[in-house]
Amino acid sequence: MSNRTIELNDRLHQYLLDHSLRETELARRLREVTAQLPMARMQIGPEQGQFMALLVKLLQAQRILEIGTFTGYSALCMASALPDNGQLVCCDMSEEWTAIGKPFWEEAGVAERIDLQLGPAIETMDRLLTDTQKQPFDIIFIDADKTNYHPYYERGLQLLRTGGLLMFDNTLWGGSVADPQDQTPDTIALRELNNLLRDDPRVDISLVPIGDGLTLARKN
Ligand code: CA
């Protein structure tokens, strides 16, 4: 027993899944299709998808922005947790990857809640910022190119309501953030973001060691 975060070996991780996962058969199929792709590790794990869906419900979110959709698994999880009139704006560069998710969004009956914006997310966020009809988002999930996390954060803060939640994926980056030998641009960007968030009075934070590290930041 310890008051330190527990380390999950394979057996304990399997126990966690066996005793808490409620993944739908449809979501599992999307994960299996995605697993065939060379970039499959970009997808979040099912326990993380379930955690994020729980947060959507806890915040009673109506509007969510996702930066980095890939094959649409996290979008499927979050959109399914939205009310019928909820909206999820998804930003991604890849028509090919997001096209994999679309039929699953359709089959889950959540496609009409999802507004997919293809193109650089910075441009989409800037467009959202200048939209005169704009309504603030309740949740923003950031899981795209790591070197742009800081600009995504600054724009995200402006697009979020007070009390809303930013979620940053991969903030532990396979452990590389704690390895001083690793000076690759992605690792440096994530380290800088983690330092920024730790000291930023604009948000309350928690770095949750689920998946590859998910930092929650509540806008004050
Ligand atoms: Ca990720």
Image (cartoon, rainbow, N blue to C red):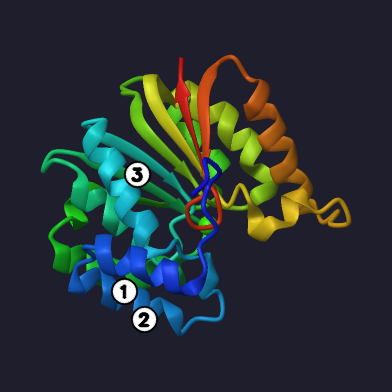
Mark before the other along the chain sequence, 3 or 2: 2
| Local secondary structure at mark 3 | strand
Looking at mark 3, is its residue's CB closer than 8 Å to ligand 1? no
Looking at mark 2, is its residue's CB closer than 8 Å to ligand 1? no
Check the image and report above or below for 102 versus 198.
below
In the image as oriented, which residue stretches furthest toward the right? 181
Is residue 194 shown left or right of residue 183?
A: left
Q: Which mark is residue 80?
A: none
Across and down, in percent, residue 112 comes to 18, 52
Across and down, in percent, residue 73 comes to 35, 63
Check disc 3: other Cα within 10 Å, few if <14, some if 14-19, many if 20+.
many
Q: Are marks 1 and 2 in contact (CB under 8 Å)?
A: yes
Which residue position is annotated with label 2?
Answer: 33
User: Residue at the location (20% across, 57% down)?
Assistant: 111
Q: Nearer the viewer, residue 69 or 219?
A: 219
Across and down, in percent, residue 141 comes to 44, 43
| Local secondary structure at mark 1 | helix
Which residue position is annotated with label 1?
Answer: 30
Residue 184 found in image quarter: bottom right
Across and down, in percent, residue 173 comes to 65, 55
Q: Nearer the viewer, residue 178 or 41?
A: 178
Is residue 190 shown left or right of residue 188?
A: left
Q: CA distance from mark 1 to mark 2?
A: 5 Å
User: Residue at the location (30% across, 54% down)?
Assistant: 50
What's the residue type where badge 1 is placed? Leu
What's the residue type where badge 2 is placed? Val
Q: CA distance from mark 3 to mark 2?
A: 23 Å
Which residue position is annotated with label 3?
Answer: 89
